[in-house]
Amino acid sequence: DKNTEEVTPSVGGGPSPTASSADKKSVESILRAPFQKVSQPGLFPWRHAPEPLPRLVPGTPEFEEKGLLLGGDLVSSNPRLDTIFTAHFFLKVPWYNLLLFRRAWEADLGESMSWAFFQAVPAILSNTFEIPVDDVSKGDDSGATNVQFEHSTNIANAENEEEKDKEECGMDQKDVERMADAELLKLFHSARKFGSESLRVRLEIKPRDEPVEIVSIFVFPFLSRENKKKYHGRKKKYNQFLDMAAASEGLSSEALSIIHEFMDDFQRDKVVDSTVICQVQIPCDEIFCVKDAETGRLIQGHADEKFRRVVHLVRFEQVVKTHWIENHRGYLPFRLEPGNWQITDIDDLLEGNLLL
């Protein structure tokens, strides 16, 4: 696409080299904001780069240190096998689809993930900046959803915005949290709060006609964000089990006792949550820039505001409920109830927003 240019990374961490020193005081105050306590700090929490995150590139220090960033300090020795196992036993994908038509299945899943990403980003921006979601989410002739967002803030505008009826403007927070985790939404709200003095943000995203890459699919049985709260000490015991399993070739009696405890909870409550984590890389054409709304000075992104090819690593979670069946006659004494995919992180803005 001759209208699309390659892009140099723009992930924040301060003003761009072309930003004036006159912005220094304002920028430094924003850089001390709570939302900057992430791996990719910036005035607006967004990564704009053509290459994958360094932790996905073999040979980089980040790859050796973090790798797939599954959580719980786990390292997958066979990501492909993890994907097949998780897809069959927790996503109910038939064996023949995984063994004979794996590429077609992954293409369908990737397309669904891309669709979810292009629904969630407008929802997050709508809720954060209190604007109608239809002003951000735009359809094109092909039926694809694009993101078109431009917003300027200053003190006067902020005062006027307080008088708006929020119910008529931004998408309801509960509706957004069905698509994106509350911590991710909180990050954008914090960025707006600390960047509201005088900023103009422009973000436009279009899906590219390229396959979405499934980076990893992994499952944490007996664990979800909700049951970490429900079962006292569940997170601690889960970490203990993983440490024990990693320290020996087989499972020790202590490790087995933890599994038995999880199973006892399952049999008593008749239901248990497991969390499937899926990471995908979504190629996009994107315009991204953050400028001082009063002076026009560039702070993040590119001043020419042209589309450039970028890639986003999007992390999804799905909670799968397993129901215990009394007096079963089938192969296994339980049935699965799949949940909905929810975005928990984008480009490690929350350092993975790890479950464990």
Image (cartoon, grey):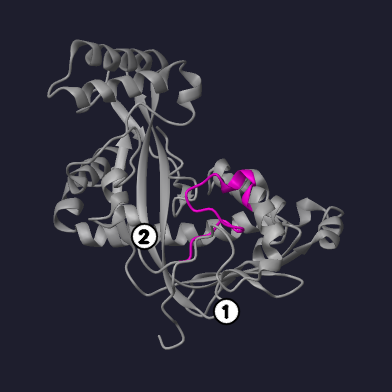
- In this orientation, does residue 149 appear? no
Q: Which quarter of the rendering shows the C terminus?
A: top left
Amino acid type at image mark 1: Glu
Secondary element at tag 1 = loop
**Side of 6 relative to 149 (left or right):** left
Closer to the camera in the image, 141 or 346 = 346
Q: Is residue 341 left or right of residue 134?
A: left
Question: Can you tell which quarter of the image residue 295 is in?
Answer: bottom right
Measuring 34% from the left and 32% from the top, which residue is drawn there?
Answer: 72
Question: Is residue 44 found inside the magenta-colored segment of the image?
Answer: yes
Residue depicted at 58% across the width and 44% down the height: 177
Left or right relative to 178: residue 234? left
Which segment did they paint magenta? 31-48
327 sits left or right of 142 in the view: left
Q: Which numbered disc, 1 or 2, marks the residue closer to the eye?
A: 1
Q: Residues within 10 Å of mark 1 (few under 14, many from 20)?
A: some
Query: Where 5 sits versus 194, above or below?
Result: below
Label placed on residue 305: 1
Question: In percent of the image, x 51 and y 46: which residue is there?
Answer: 38
Between 306 and 292, the one nearer to me in the picture: 292
Tell me the quarter of the image containing the N terminus. Answer: bottom left
In the rendered structure, find residue 281 and report the number of the disc placed on it.
2
Marked residue nearer the N-terminal end (1 or 2): 2
Residue 242 versus residue 267: which sits nearer the camera?
242
Where's residue 95, x and y in %? 17, 47
**Secondary structure, magenta segment, majority class:** loop
